[in-house]
Image: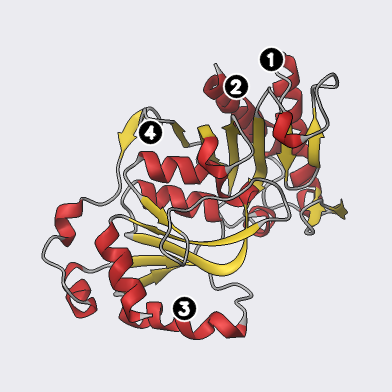
Amino acid sequence: MTLDVLIESAKNVYSEIKDLLGTSEGASKISLGAGGDISRKIDIVAETAVLNTIKSNNMSPVIIGEECGIVNLNKTSSSSLSNNNNGFVIMDAVDGTTNAIRGIPFSCCSLAFASEFKLSFVTDAVVLDLFTGDIYSASKQKGSFLNNKKINVRNEKDFSSITSLEDLKSIDVLIGTNVSGVPLNILDEISRVISFSSHIRHFGANALELCYFARGFIDAYIDIRGKIRSTDMAAAYLIAKEAGGKLYSPNGHELDSELGLKKTLSFYAVSNKRLFDLIKSYG
């Protein structure tokens, strides 16, 4: 039921904002969002579509939104997030707003449901491509799908003979990495990743880029700027994992984090542990 509501919500976002894509009306500034970024009309319209859909389905979770902040739809529940019994919807109703308002066809609606206040408790996820209408979805332990067809990360057998970074070039490795506003103190580490990669890509919407990783388009997606919030990646986190991907923090532990807007993180999403070890050994 939860996944169905997320899909319905994302479809309603698509319907409500499709005529605002690439327009001055959609780009008009409304306020400063809870996440600290400027909220555009397209962001507000999209979030409103999600909130209305969830309410119409008689669900009362805590909403964690890029623009609206934390909204508790269950007025009778405890104000403590840790004691919430109705779960959490983590929402970035328009991920890649800059692309969306300029008409660059790479932006998405990212929605996830978590039973507890941690990334590892995300149980259902939807990412909808706002320019194509394609729907990526996943439920915990049930796999990942693109328009109801199962998807997987690049086959691990492709990496079975790789023993060094030089070997990576023989299989034409393609890595996505976000370098926007990268702090100078980690620029050197990112430059090393770029130097050994056969190809580098950055499109401008983290959730959708992780979905590209989940369907095997790219071999890894790396964001080590320490800027990503749970709203940016909660949905794609589950989609990537259910597609067979491995997600690590820079210290090599499996990626996890509290939800919310103030907690930021860095991560490596890789198709297998061997690739992560090689990247870290080089860095």
Q: How is the image coloured?
A: secondary structure
Q: Where is mark 4, residue-wise?
A: 145
Whether 195 is drawn above or below 120: the answer is: below
Mark 1 touching mark 2, by CB under 8 A? yes
Q: Earlier in the sequence, mark 4 or mark 1?
A: 1
Q: Determine whether, in the image, residue 57 is placed left or right of residue 277.
A: right
Determine the CA span between mark 1 and mark 2: 7 Å
Quarter occupied by residue 228:
bottom right
Q: Residues within 10 Å of mark 4 (few under 14, many from 20)?
A: many
Question: Which numbered mark, 2 or 3, is in the foreground of this view?
Answer: 3
Whole-Å distance between the Cαs marked 4 and 3? Answer: 30 Å
Q: Secondary structure at mark 2?
A: helix
* Tag 3 residue: 190
Badge 1: residue crowd in 10 Å (few <14, some 14–19, many ≥20): few
How far apart in space, not on screen, are marks 1 and 3 (Cα)? Answer: 44 Å
Three-letter code, disc 3 = Ile
Q: Secondary structure at mark 1?
A: loop
Going by the numbered disc 1, the residue's amino acid type is Asn
Distance from disc 2 to disc 3, alpha carbons, whole Å, reads 38 Å
Distance from disc 4 to disc 2, alpha carbons, whole Å, reads 16 Å
Instruction: Please say if the residues under marks 1 and 3 sit with CB atoms less than 8 Å apart.
Output: no
Amino acid marked by disc 2: Val
Whole-Å distance between the Cαs marked 4 and 1? 24 Å
What residue does disc 1 label?
A: 57
Q: Which residue is mark 2?
A: 5
Spot occupied by residue 138 in the image (x, y as percentages of width and height): 44, 32
What amino acid is found at the position of numbered circle 4 in the picture?
Phe
